[in-house]
Amino acid sequence: MKKAKCLAIVLSLFSAAPAWAGGSASPAPVPEVEESDVAVLPPAGAHWMFAYFSFRNLAQLIDGDTGKQLGGVHIAQLSNIAFSPDKKHIYVAETIWSKGNRGTRQDMITVYDGRTLKLDHEIPLPGRLLAGDRLNTFSISADGRYAYVYDMAPASSVIVVDLEKRKVLPPVEIPGCALAFAAGNTGVVSVCGDGSLAVISHAGGKAEVTQTAPFFDAGEDPVYDNSVFDAKSGKGYLLSYSGRVYEVTAGSGSGAQIAQPWSLQEGAHMPRAETKPLVVNWLPGGQQPVAYDAATGRLYVLMHKGEFWSYKEAGEELWEVDVATHKVLRRAALDKPAMSVAVSQDKEPLLFLAEPGGAIHIWDAATLSEKASAASMGPSHFVVAP
């Protein structure tokens, strides 16, 4: 009995052994067929924004409600980026060379799909100005039909691009002027070295340029090239280095009206800032020092204590200003200095404050309290919120 039981056990082991031991093997698993796929973003939110540094090759798309990165768009160095008004497309005005740092130069507007972030098409340009950290050398018209690209080869001009027809219209020369603020559906505003504005209208297919009288002194108290314009209303706010605000109203074919300037410091019950040396004032500063919420009529300005010509210093406080009354409504001290500020354009706006190191703090504009933050991207950069 003992021998028979042992034999039965041995036989049972061999019957359950794998194929290499003489037993039966389980069927080999059939691998699943791989299928290519493209991730699709949800419909664009009002609190989406781009963060980028002009010497990096990536613009990061961030959800302001959570601070999480949704994706990224490749950009060449010294590029500009903008949403279409309906956020169905993302536009990048960029310049590349066929051999990286040399070879054939190619200037273009690269168009990406706003849901997949895939390349849609490219529109070749005759040129564009290469300048770091300058948002307003590229803008989109209020209806999303036209793009405006500032160029200087060799004279200053604005290149008008029909985005629907993918067609470049003849450049409009603006001698002695720079930048391209979209104002309306067929209007562009440029700032001139003599302290005036050049207003371009290209309604009806023919471009006309109207120049205002000089209204600021570019040598004594220049205005920031990163001032703000609302393309829908044609209203703009040019901020000077000393903290004076020039309200501009521009429209297609109507030139521009410029109101009397007012002082940020006086709006905060302080003396107007001095432009003399060795006088310390509260002054605007940073790379992107001002943002405008068109719905509420609020300016948000990064301010610091310093002498005149310290316009690149990071902000120590954020001032909320009512453009109707010229009053500073609130002053918020910043835990860490900020180089850039942007604001979303919706009923519940968010503020985006970028540190020099790259971290982004996202605030509720109603309470001026932090709601979320985004991880550091490295060097200081711009934030773009439509």
Image (tube, helix red, strand yellow):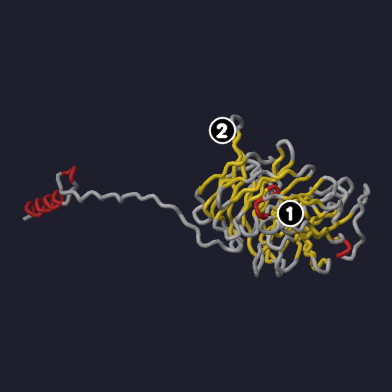
Task: Say what secondary structure mark 2 lies in.
Answer: loop
Residue 316 seen anywhere in this rendered image of the structure: no
Q: Position of residue 23 (x, y in %)?
A: 15, 47
The residues tagged by marks 1 and 2 sit, at their Cα atoms, a distance apart of 37 Å
* Neighbour tally class for label 1: few under 14, some 14-19, many 20 plus, Cα within 10 Å: many
- Report whether 239 appears left or right of 72: right
* In-front residue for pair 360/346: 346
Q: Amino acid at mark 2?
A: Ser
Q: Position of residue 312 (x, y in %)?
A: 79, 48
Q: Quadrant of residue 83 in the image?
A: bottom right
Residue placed under numbered mark 2 in the picture: 98
Counting residues from the start of the chain, the first of labels 1 and 2 encountered is 2
- Identify the residue shown where x is 89% and y is 66%: 269
Q: Amino acid at mark 1?
A: Ala
Q: Position of residue 205 (x, y in %)?
A: 65, 51
Task: Say what secondary structure mark 1 lies in.
Answer: strand
Residue placed under numbered mark 1 in the picture: 338
| Direction top: furthest residue | 103
- Identify the residue shown where x is 78% and y is 45%: 177
> How many circles with numbers are drawn on the protein?
2
